[in-house]
Image: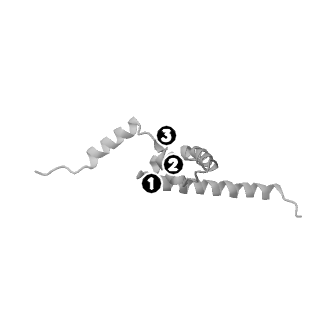
Amino acid sequence: MPLRTDSSIAFGFYLQSNSLAIAITMLVGEVAIALRQPKEKISVEMVFRSLYYVAKAALRGENPDAVSYLAERAKLFGLIKAERKRHREKDALSQQIWNPVPLS
């Protein structure tokens, strides 16, 4: 049995954490599509934290699809980020600048 060095262990942890990050990012994208929201409006942290409840539902025997389970309970889990005042103000200013002006 070959001896594992610290660098090989660290590289293994790197690969696992990178794979987890990619999987969460893909899940966030699928939830955004299911909710018909831009990906930027979905909280990555809350999706990650909500996976606990998906796992608990699976243990109860429900066998939920993670995307549909999260989409149905998006409000409960707080998956959609709240629109902040500064974002509303920025959007209003952008509307004023870029909306076409009627010529007549």
- The number of callouts visible is 3
What is the residue that sits farthest to the bottom in this orientation?
1
- Going 62% across and 47% down the picture, which residue do you hit? 60
Q: Quadrant of the N terminus?
A: bottom right
Marks 3/2: CA–CA distance? 9 Å
Q: Position of residue 90 (x, y in %)?
A: 35, 41
- Earlier in the chain: of badge 1 and badge 2, it is 1
Q: What amino acid is found at the position of numbered circle 3 in the picture?
A: Leu
What is the residue that sits farthest to the front in this orientation?
61
Marks 1/2: CA–CA distance? 9 Å
* 87 lies left or right of 8: left
Q: Position of residue 52 (x, y in %)?
A: 61, 45
Q: What amino acid is found at the position of numbered circle 2 in the picture?
A: Leu
Residue highlighted by disc 2: 70
Q: Nearer the viewer, residue 91 or 58?
A: 58
Q: What amino acid is found at the position of numbered circle 1 in the picture?
A: Ala
Marks 1/3: CA–CA distance? 16 Å
- Earlier in the chain: of badge 1 and badge 3, it is 1
* 7 lies left or right of 83: right
Cβ–Cβ under 8 Å for marks 3 and 2:
no
- Going 51% across and 45% down the picture, which residue do you hit? 43
- Earlier in the chain: of badge 3 and badge 2, it is 2
Q: Position of residue 89 (x, y in %)?
A: 34, 38
SS class of the residue under badge 3? Answer: helix
Circle number at residue 34: 1
The residue carrying pointer 3 sits among few (fewer than 14), some (14 to 19) or many (20 or more) residues within 10 Å by Cα, namely few
Circle number at residue 76: 3
Cβ–Cβ under 8 Å for marks 1 and 2:
yes
